[in-house]
Amino acid sequence: MAYQPRFRITPRLLELITQAAELRIWIASSVVDVPWLPRLQQETTARLAHSSTSIEGNPLTLPQVEALARGEFVQMSSTAKQEVLNYLAAMRWIWSQPQNAAIEEIRLLHLHKILTRKILPSEESGRYKTRPNRVVDHHGITVYTPPPPAQAASLTRALLAWINSPPAQELHAVLVSAVAHHRLVSIHPFKDGNGRIARALAIWLLFRRAFDTHHLFALDDFFDADRQRYYLKIQQARDLDDDLTDWLEYVAGGVVAALQNTRERIHSLQVSSKAPRTLLTRKQEEMLRFIRDKGRIRSPDAEKAFKLTRARVGQILKPLVRAGIVKQEGRRRGTTYRLR
């Protein structure tokens, strides 16, 4: 059976999509790129891993997730740590995929296998459910009964066929991502990990459709900030016979909010628009804010503030000086740095 999502392009939805597109263009063409994870996207994957697993009740804090991403030991239950490690691995896998490749069933099943490694038995990881499941609220009351196991594979294949179809290719990336998110979590095709894989698929689609090629924002932060509203919006669409209009407006609003946060982060650096385009590391971004707040600094100031050696401070500042973002004045011990 073919899948065809039901929704209307309302004036509000059109306005949000336009805002998202404009923000994305502004960030892509800005003087300074501020991805939440320069180069290796470690910070972005950590935020995504934290927020998406947190929605499901994982107790790890963001600093603990960041420590796991760095390969450090974290004192927490093995299951909680494994969930986070799996999500980190899933994001790395998604971002290693060819951007123009179709999202096929075998690859979606492989993604589920990554997300549920050592969480589900091997015969259930990366495989469709064999028993009925249900969605319950925090009181244990059933709020949604998904389609039975016999329909899991066919409904998932129908969704993937729509994602890869010409009509879907003509839709904005945010709309396709939001539709896929809601549909997969409603099919609930796996024994466990349905929410995580639905959100991961949404991220994958944004990357595949070139909307977030630099991994600038973690949309799952928006969902995690108000989990009750997130679950309510999912269920409201189901109660409206799967009319996704309000859900699409909700997700598009989250994308706009996430992009606005990224834009403000760039704005706050107060970098001259005449400076050449520069990809900042996280430490360089912190250094620019430090210089901005102090007005003018010397190397010992940065050494003390960041607990770094003089050589390391020099490594951080030299690319900024060469790019014309930071002005170096004086010589040797009298050298000072300020924003241009």
Image: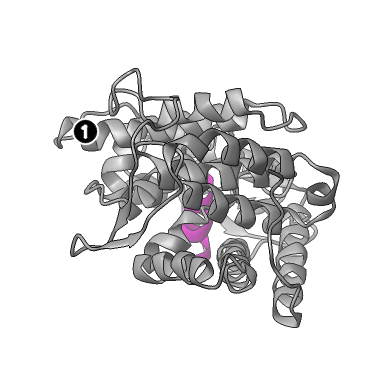
Quadrant for the N terminus, please. top right
x, y (%) of residue 78? 18, 30
- Farthest residue in the top direction? 122
Residue pictured at 66% horizontal, 28% vertical: 104
Residue closest to the eye, 337 or 251:
251
Classed neighbour count for the residue bearing mark 1: other residues with Cα under 10 Å, few (<14), some (14–19), many (≥20): few
Q: Mark 1 points at which residue?
A: 79
Q: Position of residue 238 (x, y in %)?
A: 50, 65
Determine whether, in the image, residue 138 is placed left or right of residue 212. Answer: left
Front residue (pair 94, 11): 11
In this view, the residue farthest toward the bottom is 11
Residue at point 62% right, 72% down? 249
Q: Is residue 18 magenta?
A: no
Identity of the residue drawn at 24% across and 46% down? 60
Vertical side of 194 occupied by 9: above or below: below
Q: Which of 307 and 29 is in front in this view?
A: 29
What residue is at 74 percent from the left and 57 percent from the top?
30
Q: Identify whether 179 is placed above or below 49.
A: below
Dividing the image into 4 quarters, which one contains the C terminus? Answer: bottom right
Residue 325 visible from this viewpoint:
yes
Q: In this view, does 197 lie above or below 29?
A: above
Q: Which amino acid does label 1 sit on?
A: Thr
- Name the spot of residue 155 as percent of width and height, x first: 58, 41
Q: Main secondary structure of the magenta part?
A: helix
The magenta segment is 283-292
Magenta-span inclusion, residue 286: yes
Q: Can residue 295 be seen in this view?
A: no
For this view, does 36 lie left or right of residue 64? right
The quarter of the picture where residue 279 lies is top right
> Whole-percent x and y of residue 115?
41, 31
